[in-house]
Amino acid sequence: MASKELILAEKPSVARDIARVLGVRGKGEGYLSGGDYIITWAIGHLVTLAEPEQYDPAYKKWRSDALPIIPEEIRLVPIAKTKPQLGVIKKLFNQSDVTAIICATDSGREGELIFRYIYDLLGSSKPVKRLWISSMTDDAIREGFSSLKDGSFYDNLAASAKCRSHADWLVGINASRAFTLKYNVLLSVGRVQTPTLALLVAKQKEIDEFVPQEYFEVTANFETELKQEYFGTYFETTVGEDGVKTRQTRLDSRERANEVADAVSGRPAVISDLTTEEKRQPPPLLYDLTELQREANRRFGYSAQKTLDIAQALYEKRKLITYPRTDSRYLSSDMKPKLPEILRKLSKAEEYAGYAAPLADTQLSVGKRIVDDTKISDHHAIIPTASTPKLQALGADERHIYDLVARRFIQVFYPNYIYEVTTVITSIPCDGTSYSFVSKGKVVIQEGWTALNPPQAAAKKAKSKTGPEDEEGEQALPALSQDESVCCTAAKAVQKRTQPPKPYTEATLLSAMEHAGRFVDDEELRERLKESGLGTPATRAATIERLIDVGYVVRSGKTLTPTEKGQKLIAAVPPELKTPETTGKWEKGLTSIARGTLGSERFMQSIGRYVNYIVDFTRGTDGGIAFPEDARRKSSRRGNAPRPLGSCPKCTEGSVLENSKAFGCSNWKTGCKFTIWKNALASAGISIDAESAAKLLATGGFEADRADGRHVRVKLKSDLGALTIVD
């Protein structure tokens, strides 16, 4: 019997791409086969960690005296709804003609965890090879299969992944139970989510405690002998204890501001100082996931999760960008020869032709800001693949994200943005006193990389800065010279008010999570935490969504605001559970495990000590904090209707609402039996969620991947909610 290699992909769609490249065309139930290969797939996670009651039925009832729950060995169990596909994989693992297994899950910590949990649960001992690729193009897949590595090469990464999973389970299970029992309200506590919530709560406290202060500024209009105009702002020079002089434009009283305005209006003036400074701004670095999420939130208001989902689709389905779940903003040296070809492909798109084509035919200047092997861990920065982009085939959201990635890639090869900043001091002598006004102007010398800024930014940048209302005080200055005489044609006192701190948006919260070390007081530890933060680029979006789902945070537009429940939780937990210091140290530890410089046992021992501390803390506090009643549970008890998903197709009068097991008509009491069961297609590996139900009601169907890998359409078959699957 000829030997075969079994390839395990993370998703059916990836398995199909690999099969096409390898020429595997045979189909089986849950797998593909042909030649030297059998290809099967997970559907994301097929294996999870056992619940406490699976260790001991007594744990099903939450009791304080049963804590902490720290099993000697953490067990793995199949996920019920995808168990049939796990059965397919088990059968293939055990086939006598399968001599080796190729791990083809996503090339990252989470992808490694998915494979290792399946491999461990099935008890396999067959040799493992690893496919590690950063792009889903055919060329990248071929290249990856030509350079497979032994699975043991990634053992440290797997150990890091398992420690992350185990630590989150231990802290989450024990802390959530301990605080829920303490305060008699369901509380979710997590290793990463709680310190992230603490950042939001601290910011909200700053906003709530902010007391606005009124102040005044004096602005003046000046006119040259050639009747050209510019404006300036009055300032007074102060000298600090260190002897450094600063310009202070704020005045405390209206009387003083009016006094200055009255004194200078209509007076002759002179330009007493004029300096021009040339500034150069290099192109920005390439995108990692966090920076891409920040930019998409700033420009389009996308949530971090939405940006990740779009980027994953552009990588996995469209084959247009490289692996998105990366924390690096640099390329590896082996990428250099591929860069001109990517530019040539981009030049075939009308949107980028004028920028990319000239670069593709020249000798590229590739410096350390682009290629740096020392700043890459698992994957390089997000860039376009060497595929011709057919932008008209993309949805609006996909085009937005691809456009950001494509433009940024071209930008890094463009010259610096060069501009001059001119600072003018205009002095007005009056009755033995000289009043000084500062004016600033900016002249662009070379657009450089900014010529490629997305259209939204370009439009904003093009606005002229001609009035004192501009926050930077910049304007288009006329040609001025030292000691030139001008006239103050008018001056006025402007009342202003100090502004409260801005609440977090997803963009600024992602930055805070990435650079959580700056919130740590200890200088030495703050320096050590520069390489780590709260979570990873791949998990931060899910953390934000989790905080919203459990009712700790609300999203309003781009703004994230902690609820009363979230603020009370932060007041209740110990400092160690809410400071970035603790989880930052753990992320650093997980990185050290992945690099082979820290043992898993030592890390998990520290987690065990921490879990014991949390449980002891809840037993030693008085629990005097009163939590608000859960609004969602309260709404349910009062009978308030959940969000309607659509009109009932049977009675046409009711709305379809969600309950724990199904989606049914609101007129069920009067006899309408319309029901879509959530588990109706579980045997095919397809789950029916609220989004799917809404699509069924609106359009009559939705697309999905079966457990056997077939891409199908699910259709609403009748007015009673029956479903059918169509290839």
Image (cartoon, rainbow, N blue to C red):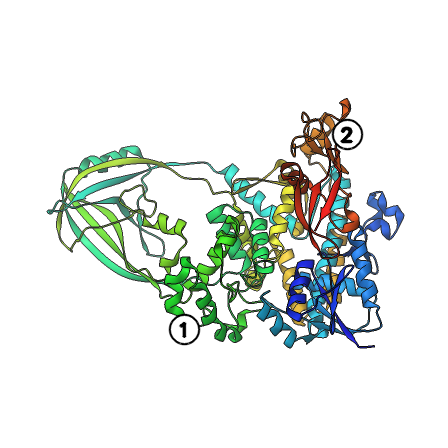
Horizontal arrangement in the rendering, residue 363 relative to residue 526 (left or right) = left
Q: Is residue 722 visible?
A: yes
Among the two numbered marks 1 and 2 on one chain, the one whose residue lies closer to the N terminus: 1
Foreground: 427 or 560?
Answer: 560
| Residue type highlighted by circle 1 | Leu
The CA distance from mark 1 to mark 2 is 67 Å
| Residue type highlighted by circle 2 | Lys
Q: Quadrant of residue 34?
A: bottom right
* Residue drawn 69% across the image and 42% down it: 715
Residue pointed to by mark 2: 673
Instruction: Reply above or below: 13 against 687.
Output: below
Q: Residue furthest right?
A: 57
Horizontal arrangement in the rendering, residue 271 relative to residue 391 (left or right) = left
* Residue drawn 18% across the image and 47% down it: 427
Horizontal arrangement in the rendering, residue 594 relative to residue 251 (left or right) = right
Residue pointed to by mark 1: 364
Secondary structure type for disc 1: loop
Q: Residue furthest top?
A: 670
Total marks placed: 2
Q: Quadrant of residue 177?
A: top right
